[in-house]
Amino acid sequence: DVSVSRVATAEHGVFGCRSVLLATGARTAAELLPGLRVPDFHAVTVLHHTAPAAPTEDPTLLLESDPGGPVAHTVVMSAVDPSRAPAGRPLITSTVLGTPPDDAERRVRKHLATLYGTSTDEWELLALHHTPDAAPAMRPPHDVRRSVRLLAGLYVCGDHRATATPQGTLASAHRAADALLSDLGVRLPDGARVAEEAA
Ligand SMILES: Cc1cc2nc3c(=O)[nH]c(=O)nc-3n(C[C@H](O)[C@H](O)[C@H](O)COP(=O)(O)OP(=O)(O)OC[C@H]3O[C@@H](n4cnc5c(N)ncnc54)[C@H](O)[C@@H]3O)c2cc1C
């Protein structure tokens, strides 16, 4: 429960405040502040495999140019960051954009065999995460600088107020913090404004 002067939390009681900046995904933002628009979303599915041997030691993201997919991009994550991999085993992380096919794992493994040029018959699925609301859709005409100041004391930021990327998210956060401080009469140092423009 959120208002300009009060935030009620599930586990930590109620906080009084002078301003609230809401920094959640679009769906939660609209639950906490009814009336906010909930956009359509793009789904993302991430699959983690291990294998008897890494298909490559190259820590490079492999992009599929054919939109037929199902894999959009894949990387040997253990070559990028060994601490993420199961002990002594490679970790291959692959991404499917949009609604995955019913037999996603089988088709992904087949596609990975082509992408890496190796058999994936012995590969083992460690985890499959499907996120239906991974990224807000940016259908044209898309406003990349949606308002972050709902009213004096109430601000909202996130990928749904800018581009659906971490970069857009941060840019919207800069705009919201800027508006909040400005409404409170706090002067921002010049560097902070430069950072917002750069984002
Ligand atoms: C699987 C996946 C892959 C992606 N891949 C890419 C990519 O390759 N390139 C790209 O540009 N973007 C990608 N994105 C999108 C990108 O991650 C998001 O656009 C960005 O993280 C959005 O940031 P945000 O701060 O708006 O929301 P979030 O990162 O979702 O942060 C919102 C925060 O609010 C918290 N929260 C929610 N509800 C409450 C509540 N009631 N009270 C308190 N806290 C709450 C959540 O725990 C979370 O920490 C991907 C997203 C996903 C899910």
Image: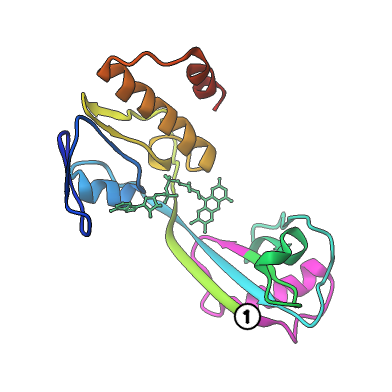
Horizontal and vertical percent for residue 195? 53, 23
Report the residue at 31% width, 17% height from top. Answer: 182
Q: Quadrant of residue 7?
A: top left
Q: Quadrant of the C terminus?
A: top right
Horizontal and vertical percent for residue 122? 75, 86
Up-down relation of residue 153 to residue 24 (above or below): above
Report the residue at 43% width, 28% height from top. Answer: 174
- Whether residue 19 is visible: yes
Report the residue at 41% width, 28% height from top. Answer: 145
Left or right: residue 182 compared with residue 127: left
Q: Residue furthest bottom?
A: 122
Q: Nearer the viewer, residue 64 or 130?
A: 130
Q: Is 74 a magenta residue?
A: no
- Whether residue 144 is visible: no
Left or right: residue 165 compared with residue 178: right
Q: Nearer the viewer, residue 125 or 170?
A: 170
Up-down relation of residue 164 to residue 183 (above or below): below
Left or right: residue 123 compared with residue 48: right
Mark 1, residues whose alpha carbon is within 10 Å: few (<14), some, or many (≥20)? some
Amino acid type shown at disc 1: Leu
Q: Which residues are magenta?
A: 95-124
Q: Quadrant of residue 105?
A: bottom right
Report the residue at 49% width, 20% height from top. Answer: 192
